[in-house]
Amino acid sequence: MFTPGGDLVYCIDSQKQAHWHIHLCEMLQHWLGLTELPHFLVTCYAATVDRTVDPVTDQVQQVAEASPLVMRYQPLLNAVFGTSGLIWHPTPLRREVCDPMILSAYRAEFPQIWECHDLILRYDQSPFRNSNRLPTQVGLKPVAQQIETQGYVLRLFVADHSTVTERVLQNLYHLLEQVLDQPYSLKVIDVAQHPEQAELDQITATPTLVRVWPQPIRRIVGNLENVEQLLGLLNLIEE
């Protein structure tokens, strides 16, 4: 589930529980300090991929659906869910909830979710199974406190959302999952759609990976397949 600002909160639910969307809303409420649960995001900004086994052929079938408002995040979704090359299909928007005039009213109520916080949050369902506890009871910290003490904030600048970009993003995501034992956020920015952000970060070529936090700011331009350079950017080895 995305926010209008581009933050992502997701879960991988192998048991196909019925109430995952409530937990995702609870995570956003806690992390962003919302006064209420942003239920409208489930209808307007959600994406799901469902895997089932055909009882006749014993083949795994995948169906991926996303709201038209988040279809531009297909490369990020494929990287997060490990579904490289999967084509996502748009789901119909409920006009009575997702009409621009109605969304503008939600914006006045939830201004935080229209801002970008460079968040990619994974909900781990195991601590909540058969429990009514909120995420605040399993040690989650507010974003500002977490960024001050630990973790990484990364930005990946790309020129398009091609298959090459998707492969780079997927490889990078898998590396981060393997080597980091701290929270991190990875924001993908298309310089054609957000030239102001590219100018602000002084991007002259793509792809460029920028480590925004911890400081000092560091970057890798061009070749993002050199594992040693990536580990050096993350301060995990000496370059």
Image (spheres, rainbow, N blue to C red):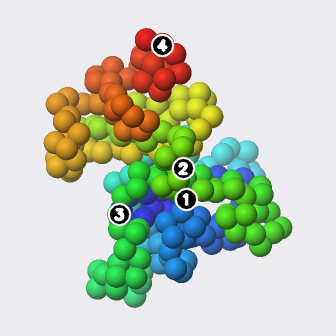
Badge 1 amino acid? Pro
3 or 4: mark nearer the eye? 4
Classify mark 3: residues with Cα within 10 Å, few (<14), some (14-19) or many (20+).
Answer: few
What is the x, y in percent for residue 50? 61, 56
**Do callouts 2 and 1 mark residues in contact (Cβ within 8 Å)?**
yes
Q: Which one is in front in this view, the residue at disc 3 or the one at disc 2?
A: 2
As drawn, 229 above or below 80: above
Identify residue for label 2. 146
Q: Secondary structure at mark 4?
A: loop
**Residue at mark 1:** 142
- Quick one: label 3 or label 2, which is nearer the N terminus? 3
Question: Could you tell me the amino acid type at mark 3?
Answer: Glu
Return the residue at label 4.
238
Q: Position of residue 22 (x, y in %)?
A: 63, 72
> The residue tagged with tag 2: helix, strand or loop?
helix
Q: Toward which corner of the image does residue 23 lie, by quadrant?
A: bottom right
**Residue that carries the numbered disc 3 in the rendered image:** 115
User: Looking at the image, do the residues carrying marks 4 and 1 touch, with CB atoms under 8 Å apart?
Assistant: no
Callout 2, which amino acid?
Gln
Quadrant assignment, res 233: top left
From the top left corner, tell me how far across and down residue 93 is, in percent. 40, 75
Q: Does 88 appear above or below 214?
A: below
**Looking at the image, how many numbered discs can be counted on the residues?**
4
Instruction: Report the residue at 48% width, 39% height from top.
Output: 152
Q: Give the spatial CA distance, label 3 vs label 1.
A: 16 Å
